[in-house]
Image (cartoon, grey):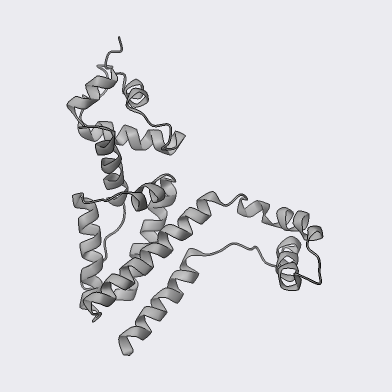
């Protein structure tokens, strides 16, 4: 039977969750199981239930750990700067943990870290003068952009350094009379005149500018 390595820190809920996050970072979330987590920790899977209720509790705790890495909007800061900093920090945390975006949007998350994160976001927008209805729309629009951009970035079939070669490979397959604009764009990428890399802040700044205009209506 597996025995806990006494040279390591004692088993605790925090240690179980940290190892679960590390496992998912290395192997993905789909293969995470109580058995594999127990093997990683050097204990029988049943020992984990002394510290976490079940696998759902582990998944919720993993989300909490990722959200805790995101910078909260600074109290009293200009709302656009606060939302931009929050978004950049969130994007960075989600990229560090590639499994987390899909897990966050697929679960009801009511842990203290998530609640603080949401409450501080709502408070920043409310203080800026948005109605509560617009606060809800703005918050969801921003998070949809953050999670959507991140998921696309993480799942795109090419790395940025491969864009030029990929564009050059696919260009001959495009009939010029049917796709002239796509051919022009792909040609720029293939030639290296344009790198084709989408910047997270570009789209998010457009979103913030649109929300700012809604305050003036």
- From the viewer's perspective, tell me whether residue 181 is left or right of residue 112: right
Q: Quadrant of residue 206?
A: bottom left
Whole-percent x and y of residue 209? Answer: 41, 80
**Quarter that holds the N terminus:** top left
Figure check: 197 above or below 65: below
Q: Position of residue 134 (x, y in %)?
A: 28, 77
Residue placed at 72% from the left, 64% from the top?
Answer: 186
Q: The C terminus is located in which quarter? A: bottom left
Q: Which residue is pictured at 32% across the width and 32% down the height?
A: 19
Position of residue 99 relative to residue 122, above or below, is above
Q: Residue furthest top?
A: 1
Q: Is residue 77 left or right of residue 160?
A: left
Left or right, residue 191 beside residue 89: right
Q: Position of residue 181 (x, y in %)?
A: 72, 73
Question: Relative to 12, is 142 above or below?
Answer: below
* Residue plotted at (51% across, 55% down): 152
* Relative height, residue 163 to residue 200 (above, below): above
Which residue lies at the image location 81% right of the left edge and 72% below the top edge? 177
Query: Residue 80: where, in percent of width, then height?
Result: 34, 75
Q: Looking at the image, which residue sits at the far front?
A: 178
In the rendered image, which quarter is residue 22 located in?
A: top left
Q: Toward the viewer: 176 or 163?
A: 176
Q: Judge left or right: residue 14 versus residue 147.
A: left
Q: What is the number of callouts on the image?
A: 0
């Amino acid at each position: 039977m597996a025995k806990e390595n006494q040279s390591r820190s004692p088993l605790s809920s925090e240690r179980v969750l940290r190892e679960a996050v590390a496992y998912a970072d290395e192997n993905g979330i789909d293969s995470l199981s109580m058995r594999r987590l127990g093997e990683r920790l050097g204990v029988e899977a049943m020992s984990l239930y002394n510290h976490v209720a079940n696998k759902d509790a582990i998944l919720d705790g993993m989300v909490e750990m990722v959200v805790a890495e995101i910078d909260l909007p600074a109290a009293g800061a200009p709302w656009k700067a606060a939302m931009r900093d929050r978004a950049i920090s969130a994007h960075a945390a989600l990229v560090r943990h590639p499994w987390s975006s899909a897990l966050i949007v697929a679960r009801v998350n009511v842990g203290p870290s998530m609640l603080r994160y949401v409450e501080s976001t709502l408070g920043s927008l409310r203080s800026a003068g948005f109605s509560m209805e617009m606060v809800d729309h703005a918050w969801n629009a921003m998070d949809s952009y953050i999670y959507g951009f991140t998921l696309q970035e993480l799942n795109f079939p090419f790395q940025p350094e491969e864009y030029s070669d990929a564009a050059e490979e696919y260009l001959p397959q495009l009939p010029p009379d049917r796709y002239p604009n796509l051919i022009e764009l792909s040609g720029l990428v293939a030639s290296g005149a344009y790198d084709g890399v989408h910047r997270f802040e570009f789209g998010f700044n457009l979103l913030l500018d649109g929300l700012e205009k809604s305050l003036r209506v």
